[in-house]
């Protein structure tokens, strides 16, 4: 009962303080409250203190029951709201019981209690530790709905926005080369010091191009950076943008960048960047050319320093990129196929939750020359499924070696089947291979 009471009082005090202090904005509300108070027009004062709102915000099923015995609470049965009748008493009661870390992650309360809390409390750091509203799912959805109406539904399928809370992959899940680690920490530092960089006029920073074969972790790293820096990530695949609905494409490219700017700080991840170069070379549809030109111009115009948008391009075919495309990125990050020791590390990471008898990642790494991280994942999946078919949940090293063997065979088939390494060709013409493809 006491925990519930503290949660309800925290909610009530937050509502009251936020309503009283107009200088506070939506980034002063912790995400757990913000989401509940969100409406299509944003966060509007006064925040209501109705029982249903408090039930959702505090996560307490019967909020009034939880606090009715306290001396300083009252219930208005007409509006079904809970009120605090004695602010001073409520504050004292609350600060004596609450977990200090909870208040440290609630900027509104940190703001009003900074001086009276019996524990260390600092508004600035509370605000810093709070995720910006741009990272909330509700905020993202409102923004997308505003920019892309029903006519643009296709576009919404092509632009995927992930809130950081939804990104499951973290840096710890990825095995990186020293070079990759260095580039990533450089960019994190640049983001941290972007005001300084702007003040000395350094604007040409914050556009990365990830190059390397499929399955080497380009998409995963972009998402993990987002997760690590607590930023939403806008993902666009160029081939998709330009494949259909040509007439509207240039306009939609514009909107995509507009969304990224509105979402900022955020990451804009443009996959299949080589598509640009391809399009420029051939004599494609004029509308498509226009779209690509719009895209290149938008890339020139967007900046980490001025707009807080980190641009990451990715390509599986760096050889197809022309100088005009290369020139637009200030850092190229190479994603090679992993070497033997990286493969062993990747195997260790991806098997972390699994039970494997006689597990020897180094021996497996030696047998998997040329495999990417994605290939190793597929190998593991095969081994797990094969064992499940035999009703086993504990794998053996033998299972893994067999799965590697199968994978080699499959790979040989693939090379016979498709001379041009076009993944679509494999799916379309590869017969029974199609079912195995990622
Ligand atoms: N270096 C790596 N460390 C850990 N996992 C990896 C690595 N490279 C690839 N993977 C895994 O392989 C899968 C495909 O990776 P992805 O990021 O989609 O590759 P890409 O975008 O380069 O095609 C993901 O599940 C990813 O976690
Ligand atoms: Mg990818």
Image (cartoon, rainbow, N blue to C red):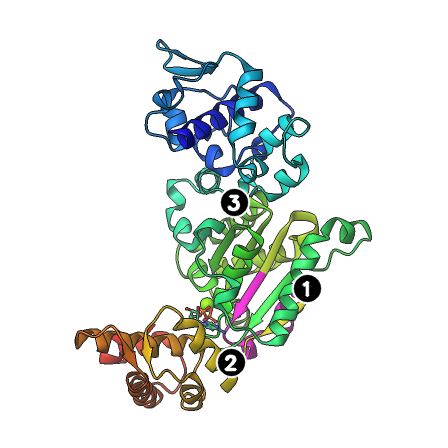
Asked if the beta carbon under badge 2 is closer than 8 A to the nearest atom of ligand 1, the reply is: yes
**Quick one: label 1 or label 3, which is nearer the N terminus?**
3
Residue hosting label 2 = 342
Looking at the image, is mark 2 or mark 3 nearer the viewer? 2
* Residue 117, placed above or below residue 238: above
**Quick one: label 1 or label 2, which is nearer the N terminus?**
1
Residues drawn in magenta: 312-329
Q: Is residue 173 magenta?
A: no
| Badge 3: residue crowd in 10 Å (few <14, some 14–19, many ≥20) | many
Question: Which one is in front, 66 or 399?
Answer: 66
Q: Residue 135 got which mark?
A: 3
Question: Which one is in front, 191 or 159?
Answer: 191
Residue hosting label 1 = 186
The residues tagged by marks 1 and 2 sit, at their Cα atoms, a distance apart of 22 Å
Left/right placement of residue 250 relative to residue 203 reads left
Quadrant in which residue 323 is drawn: bottom right
Residue drawn at the location 41% of the way across and 82% of the way down: 421
Residue drawn at the location 57% of the way across and 74% of the way down: 321
The C terminus: image quadrant: bottom left
Question: Which one is in front, 35 or 364?
Answer: 364
Q: Residue 408 got which mark?
A: none
């Amino acid at each position: 009962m006491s925990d519930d009471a503290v949660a309800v009082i925290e909610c009530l005090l937050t509502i009251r303080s936020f309503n009283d202090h107009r200088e506070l904005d939506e980034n002063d509300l912790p995400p757990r409250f913000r989401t509940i108070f969100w409406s299509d027009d944003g966060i509007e004062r006064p925040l209501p203190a109705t029982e249903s709102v408090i039930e959702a915000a505090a996560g307490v099923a019967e909020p009034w029951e939880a606090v009715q015995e306290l001396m300083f609470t009252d219930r208005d049965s007409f509006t079904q709201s809970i009120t605090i009748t004695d602010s001073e008493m409520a504050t004292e009661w609350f600060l004596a019981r609450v977990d200090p870390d909870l208040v440290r992650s609630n900027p509104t309360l940190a703001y009003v209690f900074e001086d009276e809390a019996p524990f260390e409390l600092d508004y600035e750091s509370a605000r810093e530790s709070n995720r910006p509203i741009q990272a909330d799912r509700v905020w993202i959805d409102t923004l997308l709905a505003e920019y892309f109406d029903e006519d643009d539904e296709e576009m919404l399928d092509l632009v995927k926005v992930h809130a950081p809370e939804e990104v499951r992959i973290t840096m710890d899940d990825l095995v990186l080369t020293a070079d990759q680690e260095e580039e990533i920490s450089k960019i994190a530092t640049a983001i941290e010091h972007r005001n300084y960089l702007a003040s000395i006029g350094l604007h040409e920073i914050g556009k990365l191009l990830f190059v390397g074969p499929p399955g080497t972790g380009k998409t995963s790293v972009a998402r993990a950076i987002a997760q690590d820096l607590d930023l939403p990530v806008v993902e666009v695949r160029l081939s998709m943008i330009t494949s259909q609905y040509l007439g509207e494409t240039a306009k939609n490219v514009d909107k995509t960048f507009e969304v990224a700017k509105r979402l900022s700080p955020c990451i804009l991840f443009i996959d299949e960047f080589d598509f640009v170069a391809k399009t420029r070379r051939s004599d494609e549809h004029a509308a498509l050319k226009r779209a690509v030109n719009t895209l290149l111009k938008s890339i020139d115009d967007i900046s980490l320093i001025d707009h807080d948008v980190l641009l990451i391009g990715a390509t599986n075919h760096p050889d197809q990129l022309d100088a005009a495309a290369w020139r637009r990125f200030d850092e190229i990050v190479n994603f090679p196929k992993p070497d033997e020791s990286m493969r062993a590390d990747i195997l260790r990471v991806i098997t972390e939750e699994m039970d494997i008898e006689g597990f020897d990642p180094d021996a497996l790494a030696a047998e998997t020359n040329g495999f990417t991280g994605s290939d190793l994942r597929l190998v593991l999946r095969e081994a797990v499924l094969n064992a499940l078919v035999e009703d086993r949940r504990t794998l053996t090293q033998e299972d893994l070696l067999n799965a590697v063997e199968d994978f080699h065979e499959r790979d040989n088939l693939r090379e016979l089947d498709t001379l041009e390494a076009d993944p679509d060709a494999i799916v379309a013409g590869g017969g029974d291979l199609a079912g195995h493809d990622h």
